[in-house]
Image (cartoon, rainbow, N blue to C red):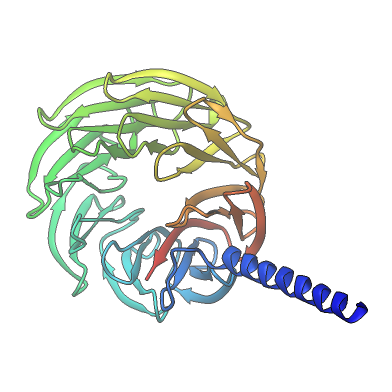
């Protein structure tokens, strides 16, 4: 009898061990990640001119890539196994091979670029150079500039319309948005907006653009079919990040100065609500269905989840010092937050809304991209 009980006890312990091992493997390997696929985060470190690579399965830094001074605007290429970015102080765009960690191209674009955007088919990359008032289109296969245009004064970035037909450039010092043909970079229209436009988002049907104006605490709405200003919406402070719901129905605007989030109903082009969040809400991201929004608070050292259907704030999740850019992995299982002052990456389990680990990266991380390949 004791021997039979021992066998039963061993069998139960074995079952527990198998279940625990399975759970650990599930925790550390997203369910969608088939054998042979890799899931990496790329973090641009403005302080030391590098990009850190973090394996999101093993949850550890695996490489540090020198890319040049003040890297920013990291974006995962939609088709190739590449991550692109710009060197703001170096005046060039760069592409990193995600598999090898090598910089495969450096493309001079002009002084002080901040961001990069891609055509929907991934063939072209667009970069506006703030310091030289230029816009360039780059062939992503060859790394060659295939078109160039003059812009207004201090173009902040370039954004491609979802239909791929046009490129929009907000000119900060001219308080205008220029519309260029995406194929030729021929100038099609110049539209006056509120003072000092910077960030820009577009509705999925390419009909309306919303532009943040930091000089006048406003959001400008532009009708892209008539190429005319619709209205300027007054906020309670200077806008920071713009987060557009996937269906385009609502736009969420972080306003650090008023410690909150303002909500714009895009179909009626009006401010429909506001929420008090914390000390200094700056960056943010949202789930694929738009049900949850995460806002990083640079002053509080945390990220706050918000259930948007009920406008309900969940408990803040502690991160490192001065959290900034944040992003969800393709499965929506992991939330990543880059902490500028503490030089690390916070990894948060979305299912439990809890911090898993902090991974040291580089000096002053200010941009973040996730690549599955």
What residue is rendered at 11% in x and 47% in y?
Answer: 165
239 to the left or right of 196: right
The percent coordinates of residue 180 (x first, y second) are 12, 45
Residue 103 versus residue 360 in the image, above or below? below
Q: Residue at the front extreme? A: 1
Q: Quadrant of the N terminus?
A: bottom right
145 to the left or right of 101: left
Residue 261 visible in rendering: yes
The percent coordinates of residue 347 (x first, y second) are 60, 57
How many marks are shown on the rendered structure? 0
Residue 69 versus residue 192 in the image, above or below? below
Residue 162 versus residue 336 in the image, above or below? above
Q: Quadrant of residue 289?
A: top left
Q: Quadrant of residue 198?
A: top left
What residue is rendered at 23% in x and 39% in y?
Answer: 204
The percent coordinates of residue 220 (x first, y second) are 29, 26
Q: Quadrant of residue 239?
A: top left
What residue is rendered at 57% in x and 65% in y?
Answer: 26
85 to the left or right of 57: left
Q: Residue at the right extreme? A: 2
Depth check: give the residue in front, 291 or 241. 291
The percent coordinates of residue 225 (x first, y second) are 11, 31
Q: Quadrant of the C terminus?
A: bottom left
What residue is rendered at 71% in x and 71% in y?
Answer: 15
Depth check: give the residue in front, 127 or 277. 277
Residue 194 visible in rendering: no
Depth check: give the residue in front, 318 or 10. 10
């Amino acid at each position: 009898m004791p021997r039979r009980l021992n066998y039963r006890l061993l069998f139960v312990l074995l079952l527990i061990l198998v279940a625990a091992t399975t759970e650990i493997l599930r925790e550390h390997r997203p369910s969608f990640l088939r054998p042979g696929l890799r899931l990496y985060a790329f973090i641009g470190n403005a302080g030391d001119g590098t990009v850190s690579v973090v394996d999101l399965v093993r949850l550890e830094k695996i490489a540090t890539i020198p890319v040049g001074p003040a890297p920013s605007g990291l974006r995962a290429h939609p088709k190739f196994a590449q991550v692109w970015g710009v060197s703001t102080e170096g005046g060039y765009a760069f592409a990193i091979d995600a598999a090898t960690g090598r910089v495969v191209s450096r493309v001079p674009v002009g002084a002080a670029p901040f961001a990069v955007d891609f055509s929907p088919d991934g063939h072209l990359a667009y970069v506006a150079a703030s310091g030289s008032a230029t816009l360039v289109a780059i062939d992503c296969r060859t790394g060659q500039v295939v078109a160039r245009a003059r812009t207004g004064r201090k173009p902040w970035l370039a954004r491609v319309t979802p239909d791929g037909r046009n490129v929009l450039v907000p000119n900060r010092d001219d308080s205008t948005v220029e519309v260029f043909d995406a194929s030729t970079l021929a100038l099609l229209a110049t539209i006056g907006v509120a003072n000092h436009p910077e960030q820009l988002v577009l509705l999925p049907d390419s009909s309306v653009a919303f532009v943040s104006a930091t000089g006048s605490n406003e959001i400008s709405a532009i009708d892209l079919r008539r190429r005319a200003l619709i209205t300027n919406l007054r906020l309670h402070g200077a806008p920071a990040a713009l987060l557009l719901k996937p269906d385009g129905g609502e736009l969420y605007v972080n306003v650090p100065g008023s410690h909150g989030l303002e909500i714009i109903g895009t179909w009626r082009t009006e401010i429909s609500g506001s929420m008090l969040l914390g000390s200094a809400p700056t960056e943010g991201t949202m789930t694929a269905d738009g049900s949850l929004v995460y806002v990083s608070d640079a002053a509080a050292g945390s990220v706050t989840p918000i259930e948007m259907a009920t406008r309900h704030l969940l408990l803040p999740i502690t991160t490192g010092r001065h959290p900034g850019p944040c992003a969800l992995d393709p499965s929506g299982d992991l939330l990543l937050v880059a902490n500028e002052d503490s030089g690390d990456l916070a990894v948060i389990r979305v299912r439990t809304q809890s911090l898993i680990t902090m991974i040291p990266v580089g000096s002053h991380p200010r941009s973040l991209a996730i690549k599955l390949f």
